[in-house]
Image: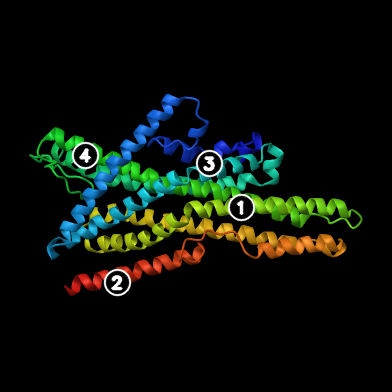
């Protein structure tokens, strides 16, 4: 990646490629407002809404299955098994709803970041963009792999297992099972064609949920990476500025431009909070429950079930860590602006310059951050709290289950 950046500059579209392409596979076009093909946009929208109607019907089936399983202690473990999938589905649903609700805010945010994006190779070197992009792409690659591995494993494992048993191990019947525990108002395994239509319907619903869940976080990763890059650039410019003793007008002009630049970055952070605050609150609450229920399944199941749920557990834990890591990185990058401003040779500048610099330092003491309602600002400390909550729920669940 570094060598590619040395040869040619990277556009903002290159940074956005992963979430844009993945979103399009479920019919969501982030840049629909730029489309010149009205028919293509309409077809994508129909595909998106049809997919979510189908997905939400499947979620209703999971909720009914959960309710029925909770009625009898003998089937409580089935309810515990489906609970993480319900939590994952609800979070995916809410993330997509948030993207639709704040589509205008998202469009403005991305357009402004694209306008601020360094265009030339020299500018990108000054921003140290290759370092930020390299880290971002590694994170995107790992999380995308885990998320798609989870949905693929749950979706296709029963069919692959049944095929091997029927075609290679000599079993007389083909086991018509599904990867997810869902109640249907009809017998979904009565006929072969009914089973396979239902099976692919569930697989598409799982894929849609995985992409909706994944891409909302990928967008967050791309946006925060860009903002951290801009905060780092501001800090480097402030720290390296020589503060000419005999050029007061030039000093003030430079500082005014940095203050304006800094304020724009902080405004973009508020756009992120507007879009993500409630969805991340639900995400963390559901993640605590998911990790709890998945951990219970891992400790109480067969080897093959444990392997499947381990992928789910890793995905949930990595997703929470990813959000907390980038929240922490945003706080650190924005705080560095104040430190860099103080490290200047400001003592040889005019009183006006020092007053402006003092105001900038004071403003940077309140760092840019992601703030879910009723939750502390997202950082690595938040990750530890989520894991702690998950363990408490897990201990309570095991105690309650074995007491009965």
Where is residue 59 drawn, in percent x and y? 26, 48
12 and 37: which one is in front?
Answer: 37
Q: Is residue 14 above or below residue 237?
A: above
> Do the residues bearing badges 3 and 4 touch, measured as CB atoms within 8 Å?
no
302 and 231: which one is in front?
Answer: 231
In screen coordinates, is 137 left or right of 145? right
Q: Residue at x 58, y 57 (%)?
A: 330
Q: Residues within 10 Å of mark 2 (few under 14, many from 20)?
A: some
Q: Is residue 348 above or below residue 124?
A: below
* Quadrant in which the C terminus is drawn: bottom left
152 and 57: which one is in front?
Answer: 57
Where is residue 306 drawn, in percent x and y? 26, 56
Secondary structure under the numbered disc 1 in the rendered image: helix
Q: Which residue is mark 3?
A: 107
Disc 4 or 1, which lies upstream in sequence? 4
Which one is in front in this view, the residue at disc 3 or the one at disc 4?
3
> Do the residues bearing badges 2 and 1 touch, measured as CB atoms within 8 Å?
no
CA gap between label 3 and label 4 equals: 36 Å
Q: Residue at x 83, y 61 (%)?
A: 352
Q: Residues within 10 Å of mark 4 (few under 14, many from 20)?
A: many
Q: Which residue is mark 2?
A: 395
Secondary structure under the numbered disc 2 in the rendered image: helix
Q: Residues within 10 Å of mark 3 (few under 14, many from 20)?
A: some
> Do the residues bearing badges 4 and 2 touch, measured as CB atoms within 8 Å?
no
Disc 2 or 1, which lies upstream in sequence? 1
Where is residue 131 drawn, in percent x and y? 61, 48
CA gap between label 4 and label 2 equals: 35 Å
């Amino acid at each position: 990646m570094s060598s590619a950046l040395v040869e040619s500059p990277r556009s903002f579209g290159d940074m956005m490629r992963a979430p844009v392409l993945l979103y399009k596979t479920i019919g969501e076009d982030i840049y629909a407002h730029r489309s010149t093909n009205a028919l293509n946009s309409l077809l994508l929208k129909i595909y998106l809404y049809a997919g979510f109607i189908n997905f939400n019907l499947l979620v209703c089936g999971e909720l009914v299955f959960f309710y029925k399983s909770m009625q009898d202690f003998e089937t409580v473990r089935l309810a515990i098994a489906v609970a993480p999938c319900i939590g994952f589905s609800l979070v995916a649903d809410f993330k997509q709803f948030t993207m639709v609700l704040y589509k205008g805010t998202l469009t403005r945010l991305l357009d402004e970041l694209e306008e601020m994006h360094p265009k030339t190779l020299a500018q990108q070197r000054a921003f140290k963009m290759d370092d930020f992009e390299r880290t971002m792409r590694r994170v995107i690659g790992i999380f995308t792999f885990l998320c798609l591995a989870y949905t693929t494993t749950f979706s296709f494992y029963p069919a692959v297992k049944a095929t091997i048993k029927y075609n290679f191990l000599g079993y007389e019947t083909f086991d018509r099972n599904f990867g997810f525990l869902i109640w249907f108002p009809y017998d979904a395994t009565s006929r072969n064609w009914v089973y396979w239509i239902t099976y692919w319907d569930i697989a598409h619903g799982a894929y849609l949920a995985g992409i909706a869940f994944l891409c909302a976080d990928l967008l967050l990763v791309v946006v925060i990476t860009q903002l951290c890059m801009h905060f780092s650039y501001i800090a480097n410019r402030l720290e390296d500025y020589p503060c000419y003793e005999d050029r007061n007008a030039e000093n003030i002009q430079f500082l005014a431009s940095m203050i304006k630049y800094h304020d724009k970055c902080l405004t973009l952070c508020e756009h992120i909070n507007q879009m993500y605050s409630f969805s991340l609150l639900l995400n963390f609450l559901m993640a605590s429950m998911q990790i709890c229920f998945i951990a219970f399944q891992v400790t109480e199941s067969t080897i093959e079930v444990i392997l499947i749920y381990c992928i789910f557990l890793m995905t949930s834990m990595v997703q929470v860590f990813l959000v907390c890591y980038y929240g922490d990185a945003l706080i650190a990058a924005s705080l560095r602006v104040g430190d860099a401003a103080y490290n200047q040779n400001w003592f040889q500048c005019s009183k006006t310059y020092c007053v402006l610099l003092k105001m900038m330092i004071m403003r940077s003491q309140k760092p840019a951050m992601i703030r879910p309602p009723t939750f502390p600002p997202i950082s690595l400390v938040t990750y530890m709290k989520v894991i702690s909550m998950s363990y408490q729920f897990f201990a309570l669940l095991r105690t309650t289950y074995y007491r009965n």
